[in-house]
């Protein structure tokens, strides 16, 4: 724990060297006034993990993640943010965006609009398994351990203060909320906006998952069973 805190302190003081001001860490706005996918255009059934991994895998030797999968909930492609644009969130269907700034804290951050892929984030519950598929075909598993919800005092401002929906009387800065979620390190964080009172960016939802170990033989067997069932 002491080493992790020390590493976090060192990272924060090194941020200016990366062109980032420690006290200006944003929480991206992922609300959207654009309606999501027409139900009539959606697939009749979600793909299996095997099918999804087969579709999303490329011949690239890169270890970057290409897709995110939760059985019967989501199967989306992962795209990267443009360089120097930490607030970018893709508006393509069945697509989520990897939050580049989170990777500087050894966290995998996934952003999506609540009218698009992010709508499925609200269906996630603690203990659900989330799979990330790399370009190489490697699959990494995570288990949801915590779900946080906050109201944004200034909904369209990525540097807004935030109020915990469980304890509305307490306010936290964008920096504090960033460190509480993405700053943990070694976790997967899914973020989208919470719509309320007609404002699609009224609040923020964070789904936090920790990595788990699944033996290659077990995962291979599971994927073969899914292929057989589908």
Image (cartoon, rainbow, N blue to C red):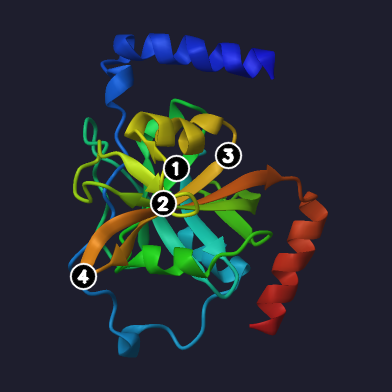
SS at mark 3 in the image: loop
Q: CA distance from mark 4 to mark 3?
A: 32 Å
The mark closer to the camera, 1 or 4, is: 4
Residues 58 and 105: in front is 105
Is residue 230 found left or right of 19 in the rendered image?
right
Q: Earlier in the sequence, mark 4 or mark 2?
A: 2
Occupied quadrant, residue 104: top left
Give the mark, 3 or 1, whose residue is nearer the N terminus: 1
Q: Quadrant of the C terminus?
A: bottom right
Residue at coordinates 31% horizontally, 15% vertically from top-left? 18
Q: Nearer the viewer, mark 4 or mark 2?
A: 4
Distance in Å between CA atoms under marks 2 and 3: 13 Å
SS at circle 1: strand
In the depicted view, which residue is nearer to us: 9 or 131?
9
Provide the residue designation for mark 2: 191
Mark 1 residue crowding within 10 angstroms, few (<14) / some (14–19) / many (20+): many
Sequence-wise, the earlier of marks 1 and 4 is: 1
Side (left or right) of 58 relative to 175: right
Mark drawn on residue 50: none
Badge 2 element: strand
Disc number placed over residue 198 in the picture, else none: 4
Q: Mark 2: give few (<14), some (14-19) or many (20+) Cα within 10 Å.
A: many
Q: Position of residue 28 (x, y in %)?
A: 29, 44
Above or below for 225 versus 61:
below
**Image height of 131 relative to 174, above or below:** below
Report, in whole angstroms, how far the alpha carbon at label 4 lies from the one at label 2.
19 Å
- The answer for how far apart the CA atoms under marks 1 and 4 are is 27 Å
Q: Are marks 2 and 1 in contact (CB under 8 Å)?
A: yes
The residue carrying mark 1 is 109
Q: Which residue is mark 3?
A: 187
Locate the N terminus and report the quarter of the image it occupies. Answer: top right
Q: Are marks 1 and 4 in contact (CB under 8 Å)?
A: no
């Amino acid at each position: 724990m002491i080493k992790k805190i020390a590493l976090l302190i060192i990272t924060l003081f090194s941020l200016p060297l990366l062109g980032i001001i420690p006290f200006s860490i944003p929480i991206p706005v992922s609300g959207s006034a654009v309606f999501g996918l027409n139900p009539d255009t959606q697939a009749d059934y979600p793909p299996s993990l095997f099918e999804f991994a087969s579709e999303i895998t490329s011949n690239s030797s890169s270890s970057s993640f290409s897709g995110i999968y939760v059985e019967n909930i989501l199967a989306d492609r992962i795209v990267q943010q443009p360089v120097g644009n930490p607030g970018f969130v893709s508006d393509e269907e069945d697509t989520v965006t990897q939050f580049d700034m989170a990777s500087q804290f050894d966290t995998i951050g996934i952003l999506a609009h609540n009218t698009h892929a992010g709508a499925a984030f609200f269906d996630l519950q603690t203990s659900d398994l989330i799979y990330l598929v790399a370009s190489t075909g490697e699959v990494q598993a995570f288990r949801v351990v915590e779900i946080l919800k906050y109201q944004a005092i200034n909904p369209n401002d990525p540097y807004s203060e935030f109020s915990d929906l469980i304890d509305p009387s307490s306010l936290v800065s964008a920096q504090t909320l960033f460190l509480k979620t993405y700053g943990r390190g070694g976790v997967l964080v899914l973020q989208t906006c919470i719509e309320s009172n007609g404002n699609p960016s009224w609040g923020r939802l964070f789904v936090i998952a920790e990595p788990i170990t699944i033996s290659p033989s077990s995962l291979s067997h599971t994927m073969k069973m899914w292929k057989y069932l589908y």
